[in-house]
Image (spheres, rainbow, N blue to C red):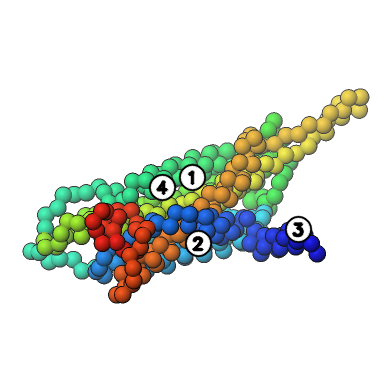
Amino acid sequence: MDITTWFFTGLRTFFDLFPVEMALTLGAVLFGLSWIRPRRIVSLPESGRRADALARIGIAGPLSVVAVASATSWLATLDPIGRHGGWWQRAAPLLAAAAVVVVAWLVLRREPLPAPGERTISPRRRWWAFAPRTPLWLLAGAAALLLVTVAWQMLIGVPLPDGGNRYGVGPADSGLPEFMVMQNDMGYVWGAGWPNHLATLVALLAAGAALAALLSSDANRPLVARASAPEVREERTATARILTLLALGGLLLTLGAVWAHVGFIGQIIVGVFEDNGGEPGAQRFFVGTGYQSVAPLLHLGGYVVQGIGAALLLRLAVDTWRAAAARRPGAGSADPHPAPGTAAARPGAEAVR
């Protein structure tokens, strides 16, 4: 066996075990490429019980969401027609991210509050006061794209009429509006409508509400009168950054899964033979869905977006571990690539990893 045959055989075996549809496949590749920029994307407070809690959340949370996304996307490859629940598999990563945010909120609520006489008066802050601006805008943009995609697919959903031509893959007809009409009313394709996308919409709303509630609660948490402003800002900024990035990763995983599904069903094309009543000049033409021209971009782009989400969460977990390791006594030399916004990133400050 020559080297070329050996290489392609190995590559085929790899993709049989780790198909591109699986979130972890492209996620691991993009995670490796992310080390072109070794600087950490998150930091932890220098001390205190908040730092320990954030370390656990920032490591276990992203890995849990990636595990859920990898498991559900792998199940989708085994069941391409969605007989056993494609509707919940696409929403699962975002629901997992929302669950992690809720758990983080419960953990942070267990921190002791200062006594009423020891509290300082602070202004009422908006929920995004300590959130990082760039990830927050990316989060808002991805949420808008997911909302538009889901709303569009829900609006075009129709039930399969009696005697209607059905094309493509999908489970048995349930009588619900889960089909979309092909061009020129030539048939129906399964995969649209609220039965296929309502869970994703619920997951989006739940994740957004959970993140906003946590960030608002933390931004307006009572302060100890003797606490310094830089310490408080560092603690709450680190919290907001970790949880915003975690929510962004879960959102990208679900957005990618939805786009891949929408693109896949949108590529269905059917050949139609018109015999003109037996006269000469019979014609054959092809019809597809109303968005067949952009369906391939949605299909393949969905896998890329899904991989970006997995890579972001893997990097978040590793960088949180790096930040936690830097806080241990005798951690060693300073990190030449400190996270943005840390004391080490400012001139004249002691560097931390």
- Secondary structure at numbered mark 1: helix
Disc 2 residue crowd, few under 14, some 14–19, many 20+, Cα 10 Å? many
Residue annotated with mark 4: 139
Rounded to the nearest angstrom, the CA distance separating label 4 from label 3 is 43 Å
Q: Amino acid at mark 1?
A: Leu
Residue 126 visible to an observer of this rendering: yes
Mark 1–mark 3 Cα distance, whole angstroms, equals 41 Å
How far from the left and from the top, in percent, is residue 90?
54, 54
Q: Nearer the viewer, residue 200 or 351?
A: 351
Picture disc at residue 66? 2
Q: CA distance from mark 1 to mark 2?
A: 19 Å
- Residue receiving disc 3: 4
Q: Position of residue 343 (x, y in %)?
A: 26, 58
**Which residue in the protein does label 1 denote?**
146
Q: Secondary structure at mark 3?
A: helix
Check disc 4 and report its element: helix, strand or loop.
Answer: helix
**Are the residues tagged 4 and 1 within 8 Å (C-beta)?**
no
- What distance separates the C-alpha of mark 4 from that of mark 2? 17 Å
> Which residue is at a point 61% across and 37% down the rendered structure image?
294
Tag 2 or tag 1, which sits nearer the N-term?
2
Left or right: 315 as drawn, with respect to 195:
left
Around disc 4, counting alpha carbons within 10 Å, would you say few (fewer than 14), some (14 to 19), or many (20 or more)? Answer: many
Q: Earlier in the sequence, mark 1 or mark 3?
A: 3
Horizontally, is 172 left or right of 48 in the view?
right
Image position of 179 with respect to 73: above or below: above
Q: Nearer the viewer, mark 2 or mark 3?
A: 3
